[in-house]
Image (cartoon, rainbow, N blue to C red):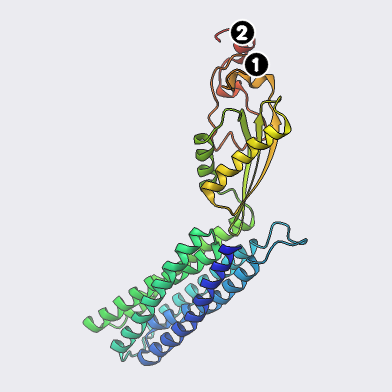
Amino acid sequence: MKTATQNLHVQKWVAGISILLLAAKILAYYYTRSVAVLTDALESIVNVAAGFIGLYSLYVAAKPRDIDHPYGHGKAEFLSAAVEGTLIGVAGVIILYKAVIHYFYPVPLRELNLGIWLIGATAIVNFIMGYICVRIGRKNDSLALEASGKHLQTDTYSTIGIIAGLLLIILTGYQRFDSIVAAVFGCWIIITAYKIIRRSIAGIMDEADEKILGQMVELLNRSRRENWVDLHNLRVIKYGSVLHLDCHLTLPWYLNVQQAHEEVEALSAIVKEEFGESVEMFVHADGCMPFQCPICDKQDCPVRQHNFVEEISWTLENIRQDKKHRYEDLNKDYNKVEAGQGI
């Protein structure tokens, strides 16, 4: 809840400042009549709408879980990011349209120096706010806040490009540079929108996060304990900043309930130390089977039926399988092991 409150606080600042920046850009367009500056102003309108959408989504995501939402309200962040990405894309299309129209029917420009100073100031503010949002969003695993930050950074870079275009116009007198610059950044904005929408849809559909799974597999291999005979059916789902993880942990079958619980708690502690406290663990403890003896290196096992041969290293492929691993998974001749040969 602490991270959710921090996310909400930062987004409030984003929403408030975006209104001031929009006013500055509209003023710059009023003085310059530049279509490139207009594209910046149009994107700022999207910034304002997206800022308040993001604010509401983070407000919803910060709510505690209830009977109707037992996993919390974190999915609201994905919906917010999807809407924000869509709005960014719409702004990009409008920018392209305006750029084409003004290329063939140019409008006389004026007061370019004043316009450069005004939108230059907004670029600095956007960069600072975007950096803060992305940094805190990544730290707190908040897609909505990170999307807001990337949106502000995109606005910053496009503003820099627009300033460069205006400077070219001043130096060369060729006013169609205004439309060319606007078209280039319109395409870039559309690409950014696609990336945000793609990521938000992946979250809504509970698509496997290969990056997190890879980090998880590396951590589990590195922290493996003697009693962890096997680990399989690993699944990770993100609900906003909360990470839900469930898996099957195979332990020696003769451990009592308390001993098995201690192993599960050890697994939970290792994961939370790496990924933070906003991790929910659901671990099903399995008892080992005789066919797993060749992959179990537990010392002085009182019920061992086969000698240890080789440990199975967990990978992204095998750790997600819904079955216990066995020696033959190593593509070895398991019949020899069963017959007691080569051991």
Q: Is the residue marked by circle 2 packed among few (<14), some (14-19), or many (20+) residues within 10 Å?
A: few
Q: Is residue 185 left or right of residue 209?
A: left
Disc 1, SS: loop
- Kindly report the distance in space between the C-alpha atoms of the residues bearing marks 1 and 2: 13 Å
Q: Nearer the viewer, residue 198 or 21?
A: 21
Question: Residue 286 sits in which quadrant?
Answer: top right
Q: Position of residue 74 (x, y in %)?
A: 63, 61
Quadrant location, the C terminus = top right
Q: Amino acid at mark 2?
A: Gly
Q: Position of residue 17 (x, y in %)?
A: 47, 80
User: Mark 1 or 2, which is nearer the eye?
Assistant: 1
Residue at x 70% of width, y 34% of height: 258
Q: Which mark is residue 340?
A: 2
Q: Which mark is residue 159?
A: none
Q: Is residue 210 above or below residue 166?
A: above
Residue matched to label 1: 304
Counting the numbered discs, the total is 2
Q: Amino acid at mark 1?
A: Arg
Q: Is residue 23 above or below residue 296?
A: below
Q: Position of residue 160 (x, y in %)?
A: 33, 74
Q: Is residue 24 above or below residue 185?
A: below
Mark 1 or 2, nearer chain start: 1
Q: Is the residue marked by circle 1 packed among few (<14), some (14-19), or many (20+) residues within 10 Å?
A: some
Can residue 104 be spotted in the picture? yes
Can residue 191 be spotted in the picture? no
Q: Nearer the viewer, residue 330 or 135?
A: 135
Quadrant location, the N terminus = bottom right
